[in-house]
Image (cartoon, rainbow, N blue to C red):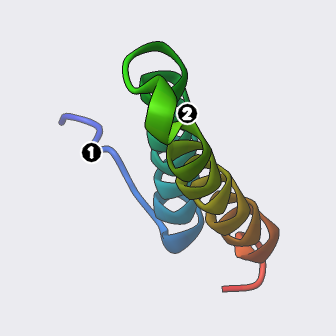
Amino acid sequence: MQKVMYLNKNKIVGITALIMVIIGTALIMVGVFKYREYAIGFSIAGVGFYAIAWAFNALRGRI
């Protein structure tokens, strides 16, 4: 019998927080390296992704 990967709500929220951190980092890097004139907007959006990921991580055990 194969072992099935079990994803509960906490694992899903944790994976989502990790993906959001990766997207936030990518936004900041795109703003810094590719579009310097719009770097502040990309950085603000990236920090917003960090904040939402932090909230997800804080809620991970309470959902």
**Residue highlighted by disc 1:** 4
Q: Residue furthest front?
A: 37
**Front position in the image: 56 or 3:** 56
> Is 54 positioned to the left or the right of 53 in the image?
right
Label located before the other in sequence (1 or 2): 1
Q: Residue 61, how many percent across, how many down? A: 77, 73
30 w.r.t. 4: above or below: above
Q: Residue 17, how many percent across, how many down? A: 57, 54
Residue 57 seen in render: yes
Label 2 SS: helix
Mark in the foreground, 1 or 2: 2
**Residue highlighted by disc 2:** 28
Q: Residue at x 32, y 44 (%)?
A: 5
Q: Residue at x 54, y 64 (%)?
A: 13
Cα distance between the residues tagged 1 and 2: 37 Å
Q: Residue furthest top?
A: 33
Q: Residue at x 51, y 23 (%)?
A: 29
**Front position in the image: 21 or 45:** 45
Q: Residue 53, how many percent across, how many down? A: 64, 59
Verify CB contact (< 8 Å) between mark 1 and mark 2: no
**Number of callouts in the render?**
2
Q: Amino acid at mark 1?
A: Val
Tell me where residue 43 sits by quadrant. top right
Residue 26 seen in render: no
**Front position in the image: 37 or 15:** 37
27 w.r.t. 62: above or below: above
Q: Amino acid at mark 2?
A: Ile
